Amino acid sequence: MKNRPFTFMLVAASLDGKISPRRRPGQANPVGPELIDDDIMRLHNSKRAGVDAVMVGLNCILLDDARLTLREGEGRSPIRVVLDGLAEMPPAARILDRDAPTVVVVSKDAPPGRVRTLRDKGADVITSGRGRFVDLAPAMEELWGRFGVSRLMVEGGGTVHRSMISSGLYDEVHLIICPFVIGGSRSITPVDRWPFWPRGPIPRYSLAESQVIGDYIYVVYRPIEA
Ligand SMILES: NC(=O)c1ccc[n+]([C@@H]2O[C@H](COP(=O)([O-])OP(=O)(O)OC[C@H]3O[C@@H](n4cnc5c(N)ncnc54)[C@H](OP(=O)(O)O)[C@@H]3O)[C@@H](O)[C@H]2O)c1
């Protein structure tokens, strides 16, 4: 048995395979509820409602100030988990609002003062690995063992998905293909930063589910063991 939650990534990608234009902090995200159909926003919310925790990387907080809660009146929000190796999350981040439990995963190199601030704001802290990128395997084991997370949804961004895939600590990829293009060679892709090849093989998947929702396509893929 795996000592980690059942884990899937959920990503909404444009027709040209991007998840966001590259932005500066404070620049609004054009890929949001104004652009995406209500049916898809409802699907997203129902996926959140069906898990014990959602996990994102620090950039989702710095760029989007994401709250990761369910829409008002739609039940109890899952635990919110942020990967933040050096505890750089601003104390004013909305995810520290106490509307739902928040767990920040830091590394042993996170300055103690910043970690204390996160705890003072009500967050629980997991310490895993060294440097900016936390070690995912012990963090996920702790989410499972200490926090009782048996289903985890990873909601980006591209860098976190890259780490998830290279560590093999996930079960499914849920992809929503959206009817718009973002363009730009510097835009963020669902799996960003470094290519898998030539250092290793290109990860492959089998199709488990597909659904057409208006102009959108929702697909679930499972990794094929190399
Ligand atoms: N369309 C969608 O479905 C969707 C969903 C989510 C996000 N997004 C977009 O994606 C963008 C953010 O993506 P991103 O790739 O820039 O950043 P990200 O994946 O959100 O965050 C990456 C950062 O998380 C921290 N981190 C700590 N441990 C890590 C680990 N083990 N693996 C990976 N990261 C770890 C690091 O912070 P430091 O290096 O700073 O310490 C890393 O740079 C935003 O524009 C957001 O709007 C789109």
Image: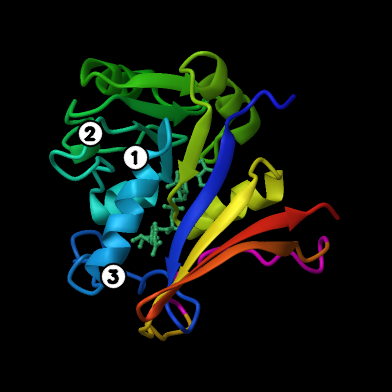
> Can residue 82 be seen at all in this image of the molecule?
no
Regarding mark 3 in the picture, which secondary structure is present there?
Answer: loop
Residue tagged by mark 3?
31
Mark 2 surroundings: few (<14), some (14-19) or many (≥20) residues within 10 A: few
Q: Which residues are magenta?
A: 186-200
| Label 3 within 8 A of ligand 1 by Cβ | yes
- Residue 195: within the magenta? yes
Where disc 1 sits, the SS reads helix
The residue where tag 1 is placed is: 49
Give the total of numbered labels.
Answer: 3
Q: Is residue 220 left or right of residue 169?
A: left
Residue type, mark 1 in image: Ala
Q: Quadrant of the N terminus?
A: top right
| For marks 1 and 3 on the same chain, the one whose residue lies earlier in the sequence | 3
* Mark-to-mark CA distance, 3 and 2: 25 Å
Image coords of residue 99 (percent x, y): 18, 29
Locate residue 83: give its quadrant: top left
Residue pointed to by mark 2:
75
Badge 3 or badge 2: first in the primary sequence: 3
